[in-house]
Every structure is written in structure tokens, then in C-alpha cells.
Amino acid sequence: MNTPRSIIDKIWDQHVVADLGDGRVLLHIDRHMLHEVTSPQAYAGLAAAGRRLRRPDLTFATADHIVSTENGRTDDTVPGGPEMIRALRANAEATGVALFDLGDVRQGIVHVIAPELGIALPGATLVCGDSHTSTVGALGAMAWGIGTSEVEHVMATQTAILRRPPTMRITFSGTRPAGVSAKDMVLKLIATIGTAGATGYGVEYAGPAIRALSMEERMTVCNMSVELGARFGLIAPDEVTFAYLQGRPFAPAGDLWEPAVAAWRALASDPGARFDAEIELDVSSLTPQVSWGTSPQDCIGVGETVPDPEREADPKRRQAMRRALDYIGLEPGTPMRDLPVDMVFIGSCTNSRIEDLRAAAAVLKGRRVAAGLRALVVPGSGQVRRQAEAEGLDRVFTAAGFEWREPGCSMCAGMNADRVPPGKRCVATSNRNFEGRQGPGARTHLASPATAAAAAVAGRIVDVRSLEGGV
Ligand SMILES: CC(C)[C@H](C(=O)O)[C@@H](O)C(=O)O
Ligand code: SF4
């Protein structure tokens, strides 16, 4: 009898091109995504070495990070922005790479469009010069972020050099309570095991609470794998995955569909498959989460109070907590609930898909954003935007006082004109709350779309489940 294998073992074994003999292997890369920030240098390196892009048919590009999200936008954004956008355009054109450019409904955040277009597939290896590439692991792909020199390597060879990562299975057990989202699940996980909790591991998310998630919700979980230090995080494909993929532009079609599904079904970890580490988290009593500090692990239930560094035993952690509280402008013991906020940002590769927008709109329907608060909603792609408009969600947002914007990374990383001013407090649905992440001096509180929408209405952090009139 064959040794039981995990989904990670299976995908790995199917992609090894050569054993480099020093613990590293050459892996075939099935899909390569490019964006405007990390591709220009790689293209320049490729040209300088006199090499050509080996597989334009497996390479796809979009502009997302520095693009303006203004309605009626042009290439003009921040200084340096237009040059990067034009470089991407020229490079894609010269190498025959499909580009989803500004003005194309398929443009959007790279990790949102890869699944949406059916570019990311179960069992595939997918890389991008971007840390949140792990997002598309939700489809059962092995997907990870690479550096610019690796981007050049993949361009030239369609392979990547990798050491086989140890594997970890993270099992979410129990049933998620109503009003608690996938974002709350992953924030709780990071708060529990820490940002180094899965360092270097290839992670499989499993268990009934994962199986119960929609495709979009699975992407939210896998997106934050990198905030656990993981190399990648994936979820075995199932009927939810297949239903999501069927009919997508780049997904297998016609006679290829059934054999593809049969191959994808076989990817699931065999019973008894061995993982190097196992973690279990019960979600039965999970509450909406919100971050209080400057690391994604600094998360607590919305009904809890800011922790006290002086009660922390580890001196390094104590110091980090003190610094975080100083930056974020909070005192130990302060309840998170009722903390006044200046801005709300709904968007990013973590939470800008159609279901995220639906969840936020459900809270906002018939309500208004608090006076003086600025609120942005930025769909992850042109297709998400179009779908939301077809459902009338844009009107719910604008009637509530939200700005309805064009797709891009927007206020997630302060790399374009959308920024949180110094000292201002923002509830954001993104994935990082580092110092200066949303702009110099910006104070970020990570949360789910529903929690962010509730904060916009209340002008303060609230438990969305306690909003007057219900959701
Ligand atoms: C610009 C890019 C390299 C960066 C990343 O890799 O993560 C960005 O997407 C981010 O989220 O900080
Ligand atoms: S939305 Fe944010 S986290 Fe995602 S790719 Fe863009 S900048 Fe990075």
C-alpha cells in the first residue's frame, strides 16, 4: 500500500523538474502573475541578460498597487506611478503577456483577479512578486510570493528553486456563530499562534469550519497565511471550488472540464497523511475580532479591553506591546468598543470580493456614515465592481455616505494617493496594521467588512451584532 500523502505532498511531487542535490528542487511554475511594482526590475534584468520570457502564455499582468482609484482615473497617481504603469504596459506588449490594464473590466488586485479569471487552479503552482499570493491557495493551488530576482528567474525558466517546506495542518473545528466572519477566524488564529506561528511551513487549512466557507471566505483565510509566516496556505478543492471555477475564462472548458475535476478531486490529503505540525482551533465561541496594536497578532474580541504590557512575561514582547500602544495611541485597559474612529476602509486582497461588499452593504442598508468620518469602499476588481453595481450595492454604499471607487490596492498599503493622515484612526479590512502601513503616522485597526461597516455608522468601534435594528 502506498504511504498516505497530503495535498501538499501531491502537488509538490507533480511539479518537481529536477533535484538540485542540496535539499533544493526545481519546481515547475504553472502560472506567473505580474504587477507594476515588482516586475519592471525583473524585466530589466531579463533584458540585460539577453534572455526572453519563456512562457508568455502562462504569465498574466495587471496594475493594482499604485493606481489611482478615483472615478475617471488616468495613469496619473503618485510620483513615479505613471512610469511604472507604462513600463508594465510596454513590457507586457513586448513579451506577449496578457495585461489587464486600467479601463479593462478584468483589471484589479492581482490576487483577486487570478481566481476570478480562472487563472489560479487547484493543484497548480502559482507565483507572483507579492507576499499575499497565498490568497489563491483557497482554490487548492500551491501559491506563494517571490522576490524580484525570483520573478526574473521564473520569467526566464518557468521554474522556481525551493526547499521542501515542513507541513502543518490547521484544523478549524466547530460551527462559526452568526455574525462572525472568515476574517474573524483568521485574525483569531494569528492572535493565538502569533505571526511566527507557522514560519516556513506549507499549511493546509482543514476541518468543518473551513469546509463551511464560501470560496471568497476561503480566500480571506488563505490571504493571511503570510501573516503567520507560512510559505503558503491552501485548502483542498471540493464542490464549492468546482462550482466557483466552472465557466471562468481561463478555467478548463468543454471536454477538459470533467477530467480536470477528477484530477482535482484526487488532490485531497489521504486519510492518515502525516503533517509535521498540527493545530486545532474551535470557532464555536468566536466573536468579531479587531486589532489593538501594530501587528496582525495584536487582535482581541471587539468586547475586550486593550491588554497591559506590564502583565506580559516575555520582555521582548512587553517592549513591542509598549511601542505598539504608544504608536496607536491607546492605554492598557481601554475597551475597544466605543473607540472613536476617523476613517473606514473596505477593500484590499483580504476583503474586496463580492461577498465582502455584500456583508458590508447588509450593515449599511438604510444607515448613514457618522458625521465627519471618511469611508471608502474599493472593489477588488472591475468585475466585482460591475457585479456589485448590478446588485445595487454601490447605491447602498453611496447613500450611506461611502466613496465608491475604482479597483486597486488603494488604502491598504499607502502606495498611492489613498492614505490615512498622520494620527488618524482607521478601521480597515486589509491584512497589515504595521506602523505607517496606511500612511505615515496612520493608526490601523484590522477587522472584517461587517465590523468596518458598523464602525463607519457608529463612528466608533462596535460589535456589529449589537447594532440597533439588527443586520
Ligand atoms: C508591493 C508588494 C511587494 C507588497 C507585498 O509583497 O506584499 C505589497 O503588496 C504589500 O502588501 O505590502
Ligand atoms: S491589497 Fe494590500 S496586501 Fe493586497 S496586494 Fe495590494 S498592497 Fe498587498
Image (cartoon, rainbow, N blue to C red):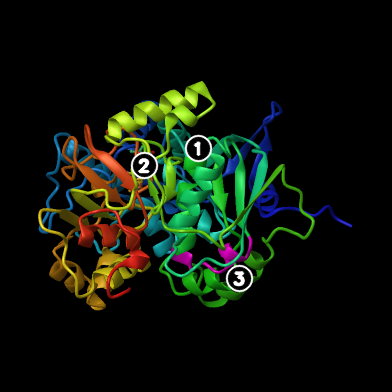
Residue 111 shown left or right of residue 363 in the figure: right
* Residue closest to the eye, 256 or 469: 469
Task: Residue under label 2, please give it.
Answer: 292
Task: Residue under label 3, please give it.
Answer: 261
Q: Residues within 10 Å of mark 3 (few under 14, many from 20)?
A: some
- Image point 39% across, 45% down: which residue? 305
**Picture quadrant of residue 261:** bottom right
Q: Which amino acid type is marked by label 1? A: Thr
Badge 2 or badge 3: first in the primary sequence: 3
Q: Are marks 3 and 1 in contact (CB under 8 Å)?
A: no
Residue 413 seen anywhere in this rendered image of the structure: no
* Residue closest to the eye, 389 or 358: 358
From what the image shows, is residue 334 above or below residue 301?
above
Mark toward the viewer: 3 or 1 = 1
Q: Which residues make up the magenta segment? A: 207-216
Residue 447: % across, % down: 36, 53
Residue 445: % across, % down: 32, 46
Q: Secondary structure at mark 2?
A: loop
Mark toward the viewer: 2 or 3 = 2
Residue 282: % across, % down: 60, 58
